[in-house]
Amino acid sequence: MLLRALKRSGLVLYSGLYFVLWAAYMAMKSPWPAAIGAVSALLFLLVAFFGTGMREKKRKSALYYRIFAVVYLAVAALALLGLAPLFMLVLCSAIGLLGLAVWHWQEKSAGGRFVSVALTVAALLAAPVPGQYTIDPAAPSEYAVPGKAGVLKAPNTVKRLTQAGEWALSAASVADAAPAKRLALIEGEAGQDFGDLFQLPYDIPETYYQWEGADSDPHALIRTLAKWNAESELDVTQGQKVMGVGTVLPDGRIGMVDRIEVYTRSAIEEGPDVFFVPVEAYQQVKDISKKQLIVPVSNFAEVLYFLEQPIEFWPLRNFGLFCH
């Protein structure tokens, strides 16, 4: 009975899963697309071995479908384990759809040709657009400090070719995009920001921040914190998982980075106990990550001050400088 149902509805189910996979990939960039892709790959494997008409195909032609089905399933398994990019899984799903389109074109009937064209158009949604690139979240980098139990990580991004469907949607939404909200600094009478009005108890020479690339490296905040932690007798992270993103300017100020929204999605997937961001990016980051503890900082000393507080105070984020 299962085999009979597969013969009748395998194509419909696979096509539906393709669209669900593509939509989930576009919307979430989460483990859900990997799970959906694994189900889709398993279904393609069943169709390739038992689908209607597959047994009637020439042996060599059917073999191609079956080899690809095994490769597709392997990619899906690697994606579930986090060892293959989700983009590769979506691309495999599209190739599988094109294979089914070719299959139906060979039927030489009006219905078969219509289905073939429809499948081809759908598959093209995942086609890469030359010269157009998308920045995706990537696995974070860890800056381990020997002898310290805390975890210091910085989020990463990865560049890939934009899919045709993504490109069309982004082009359509550009006109409707609202300007990103930025968090205004609290100003004093002399026009200083709040951090300038509060003297923090740290004697940090400016040369501490003057290392090559600090003013342009998105990981500079965490790199500097790892260096400080290595030189400190205590574990400044208090054994917690700490993440952050931001450049460090020669005077210790934390600078903004491009694609902050992508770095934020990378941090969300990691689930840190606290995520430090440049003060200018706070509202934008908070709109993306509503459940995580996001702490805006304007200079490196503020990071140290926050981490020195008792952990039970961290979620309050309303002491000292952190009334931004």
Image (cartoon, helix red, strand yellow):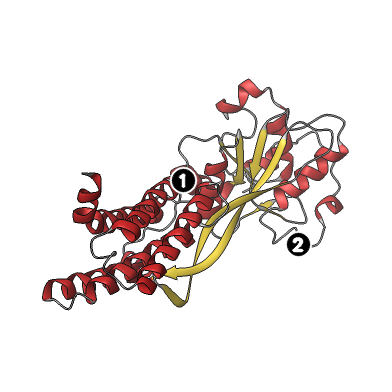
- The x, y position of residue 103, in whole percent, is 27, 71
| Front-lying residue, 112 or 311 | 112
Circle 2: residue type: Gly
Circle 1: residue type: Pro
**Residue 306 visible (yes or no):** yes
Quarter of the image where one finds residue 49: bottom left
Mark 1 and mark 2: Cα distance apart in space: 33 Å
Task: Please identify, in this view, whether the residue under mark 1 or under mark 2 is nearer the observer.
Answer: 1
Up/down of 315 relative to 252, above or below: above
Q: Residue furthest left?
A: 110
Circle 1 residue: 31
Residue visible at 63% across and 41% down in the picture: 194
Circle 2 residue: 213
Q: Residues within 10 Å of mark 2 (few under 14, many from 20)?
A: some
| Front-lying residue, 219 or 193 | 219
- The x, y position of residue 164, in whole percent, is 37, 71
Secondary structure type for disc 1: helix
